[in-house]
Structures are given as C-alpha cells and as structure tokens.
Image (cartoon, rainbow, N blue to C red):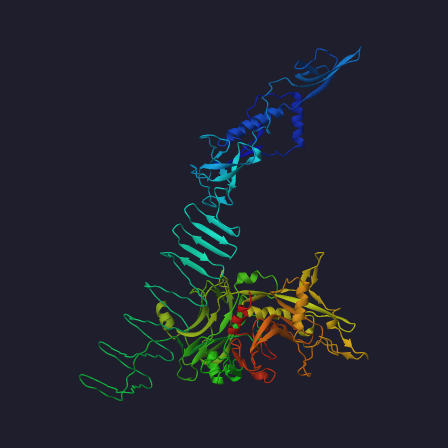
C-alpha cells in the first residue's frame, strides 16, 4: 500500500498495488511464488511516496504504483544450463519440466558459453516472455541542494502562506511555483503567520533533495538588509514599523505600533503605556493595586449606570477649587465621629433643616452665636426623635463560630477571644493582652501604647466589627468577625504528602438567642466556592441551624463542615441570617427584607494569579548533623523521638494556616544516583570536638563545652550554613535550612535551663532581622520546630522580650512561662498548648515566603 499527502487539500491518498491498472503478465512459477509468500508475509506493508507533482498528487500516485507493480512483477528470473548452442542473448527458450512437459517461454537476458574442445554447454538467466515495461527507478529524480533566493510574490491566491521566489540562476521573469514556508506553528485559523516581504532573501531547501519538492526554511539578513538590533535583543519588527522588542540587556519588553503608541515593561517592575487614546471595552474589569493607585488627568468623568461602592479603611479628598455633590437623596454616616470644618460653613434646607442628637447637642462659638427666626424663635424641652438610616447590626440572635476542642491547628482560624462564659474556656484577650507596637510620631517617639486599653482598641481593628443592638444585654455591643484560611479542593488533592492542605474544616456553633425564637436561622454563602455540610445553600438545599431555642450563649450539638470547592480572588463571606417569627409565611422578597444579620465568617482569598499570589510555598531542608564529640558517633534526626514524633506534620499545618505550603526536603542523590538522607558530617571537625588541656581535663572548644554539649555560640548557625552550602554547592541558599543535633545545648545565661533550638538572626540597632535557618537540639518538643521555623519567617514572640521596636511585633500578651492560664495558645508563645496563628501573622509569613 502506497501513501501520498496532498497539502493543497490537506488530504491523504492511499492505493494498493493490486488496484493498479497493469498488463496481465502472470506465469505458473510466479503464481506459485506469490501464493507461497502470502502465507509468510500476512501484513500489507506501507510506503510513503513523496509526490513529484506539486498540484496533482493523486494522479502522480497512480502512475507510481503502476510503475512499481510493473517492475516488481518482472522480478522473476529463471536460471538454467543446457547443451543447445542455439541459445543466445534475446532468444526465446521454451522450458520443460522433468517430465518433458512444456512450462513457459522465457527470454534469455544473460548467457555464458563453455567449450572444452569436445563438449559444449551453457548457463543462462531468463525472464518470462512478455512485454518489458519502460525503465523505472523510484530513486531517479532531479536533485537540488539548499540555496538562497529572492521573494518575488507573497500574495498566495490560496491563502496558505506560500511565496514565489527567483533563484539566482533564473533570468528575467522566471519564477518558482508557489512554495510553502516552514512556520513554528500553524493550524486552521491560528498559527505563527510571518511571511517575508517581496525583495527579501530566503533560504530554500528540498524534500529529500528533490528539486520538485521545494520549501522555504526561513529568511536571511544580508549586507543590504540588516536588523539594526544588538545580539541581546530579540525583536519582531514589521515593514510598517510595528514591533515587539525583547531586550535581554535590561530585561525590558516594548510593544509599539506604527504611529508610536507603546507599551513598555522596563524590566524593573514598571509598565508604561503611552498613547493618545486608550479605550477599554469589557464586561468585567478588576484592578488591584496592593500599595498605591495614582491617577493624574485634566478632566475626569466617572459614569456609573447603576451602583457605585467604595470600600476603604481611610479616605481623604482634597479639592483646590470648587466641589459639588448632587444627589436625589444623600446620606453621610460615621459610626464614630463626623467633622465638617470650613472658614464659612452653611447648612441650608429649602423647607427644613434639622440638627439632631440622641444625647447632647452643642452650639458653640468663641465669638457671637446668633439664632435668627424671621417669624420668631421657639424653645421647647420636648425633644423629638429623628429617624436615622439603618446600618448592618445584630440583634436578638447571635451565632458565633469556634474550632472544635480537638483542633490542633490543622487550618487557619483567627477569632478575637472574648468571654464566652461556659461555652468555651478561652481567656479573653483583654485579660492577657499587655501592650503592642505604636508607630512613633514627631510628638511622641514612644514605640508602645500608653495603656492596655489603647492597645486593645488597636487589636480590635484587626477584626471586622458588627454592632450588636440588644435591649436586655446593653454591654454586649460588638460582634468580632473571625478569619478563615482554607485551600481549594483541587489544590489540596494535588499534594501527595500528608497532611494535605485542608480544603474542609469543621467548626462548633455558639448560639445566643434573646426574646423570641426565630422561624429559621440560615447560613448563606457563594455556592460557586463552597459547600457546607455537603449542601450548596440554595433554596432547594438550604443550610440551617436547627436549634432556635431562646437561651444564653451556649455551644450547641450541631457543627458545620465548610468545604472549598473552587479558588477565589477576593474575600468571601459566610453569613448567618435569622428570620423573625412569622416571616417565613411571607414572600421570598419580604423575607429578605425582614431577616436580621446573626453572624459572619470572612474567608481569605486563596487563588493564585500571575501577580497576586494568595497561596505561597517554601522549601524546607531537613539536615541531620553527624558528630563525634568524644569518641561516640551521634546523629540528629527529625520525628525520631517520643517528644518529636509529629513535628514535621505540625510544621506543615502551621504553614497551612497562612496558606503556605512547606515542601520538606529530607533526601538527596549520591554520585551513583542512590537516594540518601541529607547529612552534615562534623565528625572530624576540630571545632566540634571535646578538647583537653595538658592534664587531660576537658575544656571548651569553639562549639563544644567541657561537658561535651553544644555551646550556644552566636556564630553556630552561620558556620553550619557555610559548611552545608559548601557541601551542596549553594543549592539550598534560598531555602529554609534546619539543622538537627543529637546533643544538648545548655543555656549559658541560666544553667538551670537548656535551649531546645533557636533561629538565625542579626541585630541592626534596635531591630531584629530573622534569617532562614535554625538549629535544633535533642531536648526539644514537638512544637519547637514550628516555633523556631516561624521565627525565620519573621514572627516574634507573643510575649515581652524587651522594649517593642518592630512593627511586626504588633501585640504582646502574658508569658506562658509565668502565667500559663492567661497566656495565648499562639505558636509563638511559651504556653504548653500552642495551636494557632493570627490573621496579621499570616501576612508576615506570606510576605517572607515565595
């Protein structure tokens, strides 16, 4: 079977030899051989034929197959010997078998005569007597070598991106046929479409050297046609002047059109767009500037057809000229203070102007205060209530969320601890808070708050607050919204190690209902991103809190399981609404108007985009340190003692709380390709040996004390890193490196204690700068590794180590060594129970991860 490809029609043609129209020329011997071969060669072979005709591939294939069959059917040869002197070249001989029966007539094509003086004989070769086809050789075609040419036409009538060229040996108007070009990528309605211009030099090659199968390899520069670019530049530059220039010298990219409009990436984190008109048409547009957005223009028009929302923690408008705000109805509202100041301030109402206060109203002037009424002035002690706009608040139903008592920090959940009564045993943060970092000013250089109350007000700002309005519990005024970090399910499933990043979390429900039981308590969320208890939260499968009984704050039996099924770019809210009694008998629209906010969870963004990476990762290299301090070989390890069994899993869980994946690297390959543990061998290092004086009494060496323990030398980690980086050719310089000794490290400042581990750091003035390395000793517990690792990510202790100078040490609480009952359970504390991190700490961790 022969196969040919016709690129004009993008079709493949096939033809079997048996279908070729040839003259019948079978003979008995050939028939026997053919039938016998069918039993041996049962599979029809295939052969690709490179058609020589540029536009009639199928006709060419038919002729080739016919010629091939003609040739192969004449491949039978008969050899024999005879004593008949009449045989000679091109004579015909009728052969008989051993029984003297005629077989076939054959033509002699080769003969040798032998005569010994008395006897004569000959040997011959013959072929069947039939028509001899024309000579055919599949390998006989016009040959050509690679050669340059000049493009003379590029307007391919069939739109296949072909060109016509003139070779340098052609004259006058002689041109090649339309020749295809090699492109890096091509397809229907797509591809890399770059056709050389007329007059440009190209290099032409030929399939299998066949002169009738040319194709263009690519274009050439020459002495008259130069690029004008440096070797460090990669560019696409068209004849009209449009260009894309990639500059490896400064890492920049420039896109420019023929009139000079340009988009420039300068290779130094700056993008510049220059044009006379810039127009964007889109259904949705998202702009995220994590630091600053600056717009400068002569005239600015913002036309919002439906709704405009602006959310910000701080806002300032400065108008040098005239400012006008016009609205059919307007509301300016502040939960705290509202100041209006001007050289001359005027409040004017065409029909009525009201100055209202729920407690006290003051009209004050350092000059003259005037009250002028054209028809008179009236004074009364009967104040009237003035209606105010409603704000989001919680009333008789309060729903709060807490981790299960079995929670050991498997996911990130941060809530401001308050007095939950008997519902939980958490110490309120106001009790255990001591102080925090305050940014110094020109008037106040102090870097700490003046009081615990001032520090707590700042701590409150780390959480979204919702006002609680209740009649019977007036002291309960604020609901603090917790933060939740959770991974998308598909990301969690891609991690083969355990523990996997959490994509599902389970939370307890604290319920406080005052007054009248609601008809329904419902949890609402975006079904695109979440499932709660396996439900999508729609009207057909709502997520309900079944306990609606009146009572003080309590932990109910019901829990909720929140699962993230898809990643998202912006904060998501899981909101709880209480539907007042009787509201469920009304329409859906009326229900939504009457329902009351009862609780909320904020879920932090967890998607990764090109420039906004909400998920981070860090490589953690676990190095076992081998020593021989005084004749006994020892080697540190990870998770190899009863106290440290779960330390690696715990480390990953604390990183998961900040949406950061810690890839643990514990092994490497030796020169033979075998997998081995990562080991730093200090067995023969004199600085890590026990030294003795002339009398044989043990004395301190650089890093070993006279008892054979590790000394808490400030240079220990630096030396370990230096030796390890030299051993590994700096392979892990950018990663977090953890060294584990099987020795003890006494605390030189207080011999009663030992040091379980410490993180690498340097002091710059009053500031502490952590570096990505730490060392562990054999007295450590299962949380030591996580505690010290998070130091290297920029987290400070949660208790006082001295005066607070660093803004990353936002708040300090009771020291767990001094008062474990009132200490926090944060991993950076010294408490016995450590299982949490805070939302503001997550930001620091991610800032120092990749």
Q: Is residue 827 visible?
A: no
Q: Which residue is drawn at 60% across and 79% down?
A: 830
Q: Which of 507 and 199 is in front in this view?
A: 199
Where's residue 227, x and y in %?
A: 48, 46
Name, please, the residue furthest toward the right.
695
Is 490 left or right of 729, judged from the image as shown? left
* Percent position of residue 434, x then y: 52, 83
Residue 763, how many percent across, how many down?
59, 76
Residue 625 in the image, given as x and y percentages of width and height: 70, 69
Q: Which residue lies furthest to the bottom in this view?
A: 381
Q: Quadrant of residue 624?
A: bottom right
In the current view of this chain or complex, which residue is farthest to the front?
223
Count of labels shown? 0
View extreme (left): residue: 375
Indicate whether 296 appears above or below 160.
below
Left or right of 393: which side holds 627?
right
Residue at position x 32%, y 86% in the image: 360
Quadrant containing the C terminus in the rendered view:
bottom right
Up-down relation of residue 594 to residue 125 (above or below): below
Nearest the camera: 589 or 412?
A: 412
Q: Please state, as top left, top right, bottom left or bottom right, where the N terminus lies in the image.
A: top right
Front residue of 375/173: it is: 173
> Which residue is painted at 62% across and 26% down in the image?
72
Is residue 354 visible in the rendered image? The answer is yes
Instruction: Name which quarter of the figure residue 396 lies in.
Output: bottom left
């Amino acid at each position: 079977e022969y196969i040919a490809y016709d690129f004009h029609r993008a079709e493949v043609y096939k033809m079997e030899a048996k279908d070729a129209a040839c003259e019948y020329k079978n003979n008995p011997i050939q028939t026997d051989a053919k039938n016998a071969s069918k039993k041996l060669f049962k599979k029809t072979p295939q052969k690709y034929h490179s058609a020589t005709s540029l536009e009639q591939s199928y006709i060419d294939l038919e002729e080739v197959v016919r010629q091939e069959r003609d040739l192969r059917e004449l491949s039978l040869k008969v050899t024999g010997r005879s004593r008949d002197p009449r045989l000679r070249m091109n004579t015909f001989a009728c052969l008989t078998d051993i029984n003297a029966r005629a077989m076939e007539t054959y033509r002699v094509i080769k003969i040798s005569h032998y005569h010994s003086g008395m006897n004569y004989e000959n040997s011959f070769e013959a072929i069947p007597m039939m028509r001899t086809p024309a000579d055919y050789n599949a390998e006989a075609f016009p040959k050509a070598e690679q050669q340059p040419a000049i493009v003379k036409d590029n307007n391919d009538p069939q739109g296949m991106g072909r060109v016509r060229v003139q070779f340098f040996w052609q004259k006058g108007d002689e041109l090649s046929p339309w020749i295809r070009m090699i492109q890096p990528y091509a397809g229907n309605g797509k591809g890399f479409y770059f056709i050389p211009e007329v007059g440009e030099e190209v290099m032409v090659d030929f399939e299998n050297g066949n002169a009738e199968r040319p194709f263009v390899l690519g274009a050439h520069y020459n002495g008259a046609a130069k690029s004008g670019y440096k070797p460090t530049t990669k560019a696409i530059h068209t004849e009209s002047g449009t260009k894309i220039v990639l500059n490896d010298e400064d890492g920049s990219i420039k896109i420019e059109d023929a009139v000079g409009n340009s988009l420039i990436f300068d290779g130094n984190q700056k993008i510049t767009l220059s044009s006379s008109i810039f127009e964007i048409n889109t259904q949705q547009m998202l702009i995220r500037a994590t630091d600053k957005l600056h717009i400068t223009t002569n005239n600015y028009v913002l036309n919002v057809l439906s709704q405009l929302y602006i959310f910000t923690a701080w806002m300032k408008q400065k108008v040098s000229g005239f400012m006008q705000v016009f609205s059919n109805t307007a509301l300016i509202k502040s939960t705290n203070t509202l100041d209006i100041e001007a050289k001359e301030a005027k409040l004017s109402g065409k029909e009525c102007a009201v100055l209202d206060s729920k407690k006290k109203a003051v009209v004050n002037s350092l000059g003259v205060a005037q009250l002028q009424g054209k028809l008179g002035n009236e004074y009364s002690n009967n104040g009237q209530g003035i209606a105010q706009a409603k704000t989001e608040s919680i009333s008789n139903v309060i729903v709060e969320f807490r981790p299960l008592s079995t929670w050991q920090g498997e996911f990130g959940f941060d809530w401001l601890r308050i007095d939950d009564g008997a519902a939980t045993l958490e110490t309120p943060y106001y009790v255990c808070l001591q102080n925090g970092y305050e940014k110094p000013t020109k008037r106040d250089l102090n870097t700490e708050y003046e009081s615990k109350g001032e520090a707590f007000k700042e701590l409150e700002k780390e959480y979204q607050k919702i006002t609680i309005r209740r009649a019977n519990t007036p002291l309960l005024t604020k609901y603090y919204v917790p933060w939740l970090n959770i991974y998308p399910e598909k990301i969690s499933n891609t991690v083969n190690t355990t523990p996997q990043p959490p994509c599902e979390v389970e939370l307890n429900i604290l319920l406080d209902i005052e007054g009248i039981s609601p008809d329904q308590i419902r949890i609402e969320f975006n079904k695109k991103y979440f499932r709660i208890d396996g439900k999508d939260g729609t009207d057909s499968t709502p997520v309900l809190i079944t306990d609606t009984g009146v009572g003080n704050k309590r932990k109910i039996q019901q829990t909720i399981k929140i699962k993230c099924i898809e990643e998202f770019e912006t904060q998501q809210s899981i909101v709880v609404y209480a539907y007042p009694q009787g509201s469920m008998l009304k329409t859906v629209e009326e229900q939504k108007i009457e329902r009351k906010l009862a609780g909320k969870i904020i879920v932090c963004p967890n998607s990764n985009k090109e420039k906004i990476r909400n998920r981070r990762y860090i490589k953690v290299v676990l190095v076992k340190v081998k020593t021989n301090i005084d004749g006994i070989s020892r080697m540190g390890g990870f998770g190899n003692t009863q106290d440290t069994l779960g330390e690696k899993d715990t480390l990953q869980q604390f990183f998961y709380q900040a949406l950061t994946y810690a890839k643990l690297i514990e092994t490497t390959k030796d020169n033979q390709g075998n997998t081995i543990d990562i080991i730093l061998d200090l067995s023969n290092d004199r600085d890590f040996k026990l030294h003795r004086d002339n009398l044989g009494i043990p004395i301190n060496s650089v890093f070993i004390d006279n008892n054979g323990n590790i000394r808490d030398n400030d240079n220990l980690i630096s030396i370990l890193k230096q030796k390890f980086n030299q051993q590994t050719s700096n392979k892990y310089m950018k990663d977090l490196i953890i060294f584990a000794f099987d020795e003890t490290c006494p605390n030189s400042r207080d011999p009663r204690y030992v040091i379980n581990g410490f993180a690498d750091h340097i002091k710059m003035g009053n500031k502490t700068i952590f570096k990505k390395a730490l060392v562990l000793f054999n007295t450590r517990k299962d949380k030591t590794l996580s505690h010290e690792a998070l130091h290297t990510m920029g987290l400070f202790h949660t208790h006082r180590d001295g005066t607070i100078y660093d803004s990353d040490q936002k708040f300090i609480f009771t020291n767990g060594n001094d008062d474990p009952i009132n200490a926090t359970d944060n991993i950076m504390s010294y408490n016995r129970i450590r299982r949490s991190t805070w939302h503001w700490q997550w930001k620091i961790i991610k800032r120092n991860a990749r």
